[in-house]
Image (spheres, grey):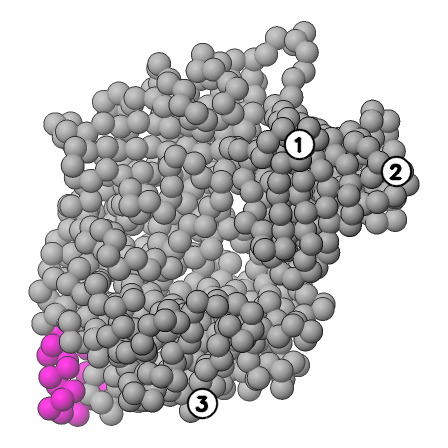
Amino acid sequence: MMESCCRDMTTRAALCRGLLKCVVGVMMMGTATGLKAMTLEELRASRKALAHRPRRVIANNDGCDCLYYPVNEEATAKGFLDKRTTDIAGKHVDTIAYCSISSGFSHFTHHTQVGTVLTRQGVDYGIQPKKRNITQDLIDQGADCLKLVVDFAHEHGMEAFWSMRMNDTHDVSHHPDKPYFLFPTLKETHPEWLVGDPVKRTPHGRWSSVNYAVPEVRDLAFAYIQEVCQGYDVDGVELDFFRHLCYFPETAKGGVATDEERGLMTELMRRVRTMTEEVGLKRGRPILVSIRVPDSVGYCRDMGFDLEKWLEEGLIDILVTTCYFRLNPWSYSVDLGRKHGVAVYPCLSDSRVRGEVRFKRRSLEGYRGRAMNVWASGASGLHLFNNFSPRSPIWEEIGDPTLLATKTKLYFATVRDGDPRSYLKTGRSYRTTPVLTPAHPVLFTGDRRVAVPVHVGRVPAADADASITCHVRIPSRLKPEQVSVSLNDTVLQNGQLKEEWLDYAVPAGALKPGDNLVSIGVVPRDPGAEATWSISTALMDLPGAPWERDPGSSATTVERVESEGVRIADRGTNSGDYCYFRNAWGASFEAGAVAEVEAKVVSGESCLIISDSQSGERLVLAPGHITLWHNRSRKHDMDTTSDFHRYRLEAEGTHLRVLVDGDVVLDLPDGLPSRPYYRQNQLKFGATNSPGEGEAIWRAVRARTTGIACKDIVIKVAHAE
């Protein structure tokens, strides 16, 4: 059935090359010459046909080509288009979804009369000194960024959608004492329209989100969409609900949307549908409505989107799913779309997985594997988000599954590891897909194997010139003979250790289309053997892999101090003024974990941080005392600055102990409750966090966990190219 799906997709992709250009050409000719009046029934029939016509790739351009234009280049239409648009013409992109910023829920870079034209310059707010905003330049030249992209798309046989981020909160960095250039006057004038404020920030979502329970907010959202539909020759609108997921105060506080709130959002969607039909009738061709939402009906419902009702009532034409996180296999979205006759385009957004080495999800091979999985699911096509390399081979490959079948591909157990609890407290309960990345490892021990599915969209034919390798990332201290790995029912043999990776050649017939179960175990350690550190790093130089360093800022320094250790200093109070070294240590507090550092405080506050994806705590080192971040009342006075001391955290269940030079100084039986904002499984040490300052010298860091961390699993299907 998988092969059949791929053949179907190949046929549709092939048809698309000629059909789409022909249809768009006819539409544009009709616009120029004047189409005869359509009835509503004819409009709806035409809209349905257009919604289901072949599209290989929908490319979302988030509009930063206009907002962050090189300061030393003349602002011209050609220069603007060349940044992200010109080179995708004639490739697999059949639709461009252009976002004219829509940041802060009123700022736009198209020539709006309803919202605010964003003319501010980042450099005036202390950011992006080598870039400038050319919004006004293009408007003054007679064609704003949105019109330029729409016209270009139509000239080259592509569709053009306007993409609006329904609650963009890139302005969240705003603070009254330090304004941020994307924070709009609208929010300054109406702080009561927001779900929070910059001081009392919300535990979920972002405080700068507008509250869609406010009638004026919904009216503005509708007016923004209506203005574009009436004023621009767009083929559709893309309503991006995923950027960002917070629409009501209750969800921001940890609850779920009410039936009344869901009803308000449904009514807004009905207004949009009615308006697009009215405009479509006047101009003689439809305006499609596309939405981008999480890939779970239940998650959407709790967030305030009655997705099933929207589908049942025919309020949307194209369904795009996922962004920061993914909850279900692609087949979930495809089946949902088929049930309601809606085209489905899974979104391949930038993975943002941290701690990768050797194999990268953002690589060409990684995108090929992701695309093949989408085509195998039976989806209508692909949606590409946050990929701004117009000259990349991606644009000439991922829209053709037959071509992809001949290319080397990487298949990862998990591509997006964002936490759904960031926006919805109960978000994890809707996730059915595995989570395995360097920042979210899984544990295995001598008596507990771990089994992780890796989805493979297409398996090479028996006579294909291809090789298949299973790569498992484990601590480099382990030897191949200490680890047991199987793929489905086949035990993999002769693993070769390369840095942190065990490489296994996969025999013919072991890999299958769909989910492949990779099972990992370790030969049990002798019970009588002395416990050893799973991480032990002497800081006689800057720590390398598997440690990962934060980028920090100009106010943070990391340097080797002769004969003493590594100095990490934060001497700034602005956002980004901090620096930690991080290690995905694979801890489980339930099973027990220990972390220890040798350090000498210089000034301010520095921290040792432990987390296991469920909970976490920070040991704060300061002149004259140590304390715990979440238990500031528990303080131990001591001289921390004149010499090095050995600071140790012991976690067992919810029990947390702090030891200094071997002596227990703080003991908290319930010191590690569930803390959802500790979403990563990491050991970290370094210099405070904004807006604090801190400086310390670190001589050694050690850790021990009961389990062994598997940080990644990759199946590579290699072809001779």
Which label lies toward us, 1 or 3? 1
Position of residue 685 relative to residue 570, above or below, is: above
Magenta-highlighted residues: 23-48
Residue 26 magenta-highlighted: yes
* Disc on res. 114: 3
Q: Quadrant of residue 312?
A: bottom left
Residue type marked 2: Asp
The one nearer the camera, 295 or 437, is 437
Magenta span dominant secondary structure: helix
Q: Is residue 121 above or below residue 219?
A: above
Find the distance from the CA under tag 1 to the CA under tag 2: 22 Å
Specify the label residue 700 is tagged with. Answer: none
Q: Are marks 2 and 3 in contact (CB under 8 Å)?
A: no
Q: Which residue is mark 2?
A: 639
Percent position (x, y) of residue 215? 56, 85
Q: Earlier in the sequence, mark 2 or mark 3?
A: 3
- The vertical placement of 702 against 297, above or below, is above
